[in-house]
Image (cartoon, rainbow, N blue to C red):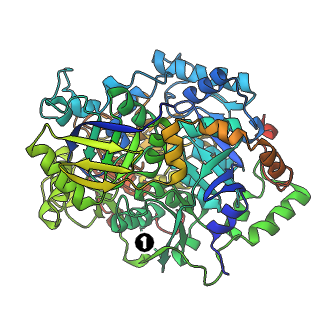
Amino acid sequence: MEPFRRVAGIAAPLDRPNVDTDQIIPKQFLKRIERSGYGPFLFNDWRYHADGSENLEFELNRHPWRHAPVLLTGRNFGCGSSREHAAWALEDYGVRAVVAPSFGDIFHTNALKIGLLPVRIPEAVVARWIDLAIEEPGLEMVVDLEQGYVEFAGERQPIDIDEHTRARLLEGLDDIALSLQQSDVIAAFEAQRPRWLPQTSALR
Amino acid sequence: MPTTLFDKIWRSHVVHDDDGVVLLYIDLHLVHEVTSPQAFEALRLAGRRVRRPDLTVATMDHNVPTTDRSLPITDAVSRQQMETLTANCAEFGIACFGIGDPRNGIVHIIGPELGLSLPGMTMVCGDSHTSTHGAFGALAFGIGTSEVEHVLATQTLPQRVPRTMEVRVDGARGFGVTAKDLILGVIGAIGVDGATGHVIEYTGAAIRDLSMEGRMTVCNMSIEAGARAGLIAPDDTTIEYLGDRPAAPKGAAWDEAVAAWRELRSDDGAAYDRAVIFDAAEIAPQVTWGTNPAQVAPVTGAVPHPDQWENASDRAAVQRALDYMGLAPGVPLQEITIDRVFIGSCTNSRIEDLRAAADVVRGHRVAASVHAMVVPGSARVRRQAEAEGLHQVFLDAGFEWREPGCSMCLGMNPDVLAERERCASTSNRNFEGRQGKNGRTHLVSPPMAAAAAITGHLVDVRTLGASPVATGAV
């Protein structure tokens, strides 16, 4: 995983609550077995007309928000399906951080696993910032995980994140390698599991 | 101190606790073709193995065609994804139930019917509807592909403890009201993010009264309120359902298991972080009118007006939903005509769902303007329905009777809505484009979907007369 330390750049406003993962990456793109290359399909049904041309009404198709590194959006972003392809598509498109009042739980975890930073900011602040971003499209946002703040139009908000996750993101550490260090503890746990628990090998 | 059912399951699975980040042991990992290929590839690249293939099982469901299985799969990308799962399972020693296997079906249908989903377990799957298995008193939740890789490699997941929420449904369901209506009513009241960050425990007389099939429908849709998981404490209904399932324990192990399961309930006085209470008698058959499952109303109601919402952003979202759905405020829901009916999905494709729909359909014909299909949740459900003659009821009425799979719930296979087609669907999500680009979904129960198929419009199943639907089966 790429470390996340600090990002400064345009914040693209997407003023909608409950943006679900079916919108972020529609199902027809989940058939691929690759890990990369989902950026062109990000928000596909909102971004393109039926004939494949760009929908110029859609925020990310407008200057200067195209390929903005920060997405500023409504509550419950990433609700719905568990598809990590949603986080992969944002990452591949160039988004490094998503700022919203709240997130779907699974999307939130998926994003943190790949170094895409979801930042929770109070809803009233997000509403004000979205208005500002629309009024002054060139405004930059700073997302500084090292110092633990987000700053936009001179206003600072703290980044609410646990120390464990913050440290992992700053270092770009592999979660699995950390868990594998506990192999002996896992084996000890396994030795005392009840015998009635099912084994799939019995069905083969 | 009194503890909740959630606390008991959680504590018994803590492998290691690093200052609030818990390494949680996973008793069963369900795998399907869509969210696993990148996880297996990453394992290979890192030179890692699958720690417990014997606690892992795979099925193919999202991509599979539901038409004639003797024909080749024409979608090359779908075919490659299924072949990749077969190859990965062979390489890593995982049981895989592909197309044609008598145990094949939707991942959340086959776990319970094989007896793999048992009380007190922790279960995960790269699929948000993993919450289904909570009906058995298992802590079951959806994960992303990075976590799929983590579980494959370590059989554990690093987790922070979620909050708990009691959703109590008192009273008794009225005539024509199903488990689907209860959960849609709950989601409509608490909102599409009403349980984010929480594990729900469903309690109360109306929940206890549900069959295992009904409980699975309720827990399945926990994620539609944003919940991490949904739980129902095991009882006689649970134990009776599990009795002779293939992977359920046998002999002395069964007795030990039952003794453990009898202890699995929230203690009197156990505290939840939040609690909400509903009266089942006040919940009518439900229909969604918008583009998320909380945009729902009693079938006797009308399409709402955006002005009913206080906040400008919410008003805009409701207007956007109505525009997408092609609906005007104030239109009675029962006047909305439909083009398609889909009875299926991990929410409502179990045998009781099909029985309840067949009870409404029997002796009627699908309206000439409607294209209706029934997609059983698994090969086993399909066999059982055929043994009971249900397929003939559907075929005689003009429904298509399909092979099992996720099908039009998400339309990854060829089963999709055309642009602006309107569907009464027993599935779980009415998101924009979910069933096909610009397709319009109205979520309903199986009897309500059957009634809509017959009349050609959304309709209150309770007004259809001779229907014996709500005698308590679902």
Q: Residue at x 25, y 53 (%)?
A: B290
Disc 1: which chain? B
For the residue carrying disc 1, how many other residues have a C-alpha within 10 Å: few (<14), some (14-19), or many (20+)? some
Residue A106 sits above or below residue A31 on the image: below
Let me know if residue B68 appears in the view: yes
Residue that carries the numbered disc 1 in the rendered image:
B175
* Residue at point 59%, 35% (across, down): A174
Q: Residue at x 36, y 35 (%)?
A: A96
Q: Is residue B327 left or right of residue B296?
A: left
Residue B256 x %, y %: 86, 63
Q: Is residue B281 above or below residue A16?
A: below
Residue B377 is left or right of residue B412, and the answer is right
Task: Name the image quarter holding the C terminus of chain A.
Answer: top right
x%, y% of residue B90?
72, 23
The quadrant where residue B101 appears? top right
Q: Residue furthest right?
A: B252
Q: Would you say residue A113 is visible in this rendering?
A: no
Residue type for callout 1: Phe
Q: Position of residue B251 (x, y in %)?
A: 90, 57
Q: Position of residue B342 (x, y in %)?
A: 40, 43
Instruction: In the displayed orientation, state which residue is furthest to the left.
Output: A135
Say which of B63 and B134 sits in front: B134
User: Total label count?
Assistant: 1
